[in-house]
Image (cartoon, helix red, strand yellow):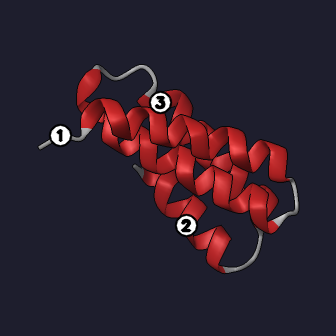
């Protein structure tokens, strides 16, 4: 959780490369946690995608946004 806060802080400071590093560390940790962390993992993927979009790396942004959507579809209950 500490890495997420650091990543968000760096992102607000427009230090995108540093933010990506912290988000990647958080993703590595959350990927090891059982299904209870899936929603947070989806949020992390979305944040990474948003940073890549800001950096103009649209293919990477699309990849991470797609990962986020895949997790969301699996974890959000349907009506």
Residue 50: percent from left, percent from top: 65, 60
Relative to 34, 62 lies left or right: right
Along the polypeptide, which appears first: circle 2 or circle 3? 2
At mark 1, the secondary structure is loop
Where 44 sits versus 5, above or below?
above
Query: Mark 3 and mark 2 in contact (Cβ < 8 Å)?
Result: no
Does residue 67 lie above or below 53 as drawn?
A: above
Q: Residues within 10 Å of mark 3 (few under 14, many from 20)?
A: some
Distance of label 1 from label 3 (alpha carbons): 28 Å
- Asked if the residues shown at circle 1 and circle 2 are in contact, with their CB atoms under 8 angstroms apart, the answer is no
Pick whichever, 7 or 53, lies toward us: 53
Q: Tell me where residue 52 appears, x and y as whole percent.
A: 77, 56
Q: Which residue is mark 3?
A: 29
Q: Nearer the viewer, mark 1 or mark 2?
A: 1
Label disc, if present, on residue 21 of the rendered structure: none
Pointer 1 or 3: first along the chain: 3
Q: Earlier in the sequence, mark 1 or mark 2?
A: 2
Q: CA distance from mark 1 to mark 2?
A: 30 Å
The residue that disc 2 covers is: 8
Q: Nearer the viewer, residue 74 or 5?
A: 74
Q: Residue at x 73, y 50 (%)?
A: 61
Q: Which residue is outermost to the front? A: 79
Which quadrant does the C terminus fall into?
A: top left
Question: In the image, which disc is placed on residue 78?
Answer: 1
Q: Nearer the viewer, residue 38 or 77?
A: 77
Alpha carbon of mark 2 to alpha carbon of mark 3: how far? 16 Å
Side (left or right) of 6 relative to 37: right
Instruction: Give x and y (percent) for residue 68.
Output: 50, 42
């Amino acid at each position: 959780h500490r890495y997420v806060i650091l990543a968000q802080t760096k992102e607000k400071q427009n230090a995108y490369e540093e933010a990506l590093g912290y988000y990647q560390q958080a993703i590595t940790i959350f990927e090891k946690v059982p299904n209870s962390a899936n929603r947070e993992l989806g949020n992390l993927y979305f944040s990474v995608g948003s940073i890549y979009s800001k950096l103009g790396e649209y293919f990477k942004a699309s990849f991470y946004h797609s990962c986020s959507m895949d997790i969301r579809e699996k974890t959000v209950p349907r009506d």
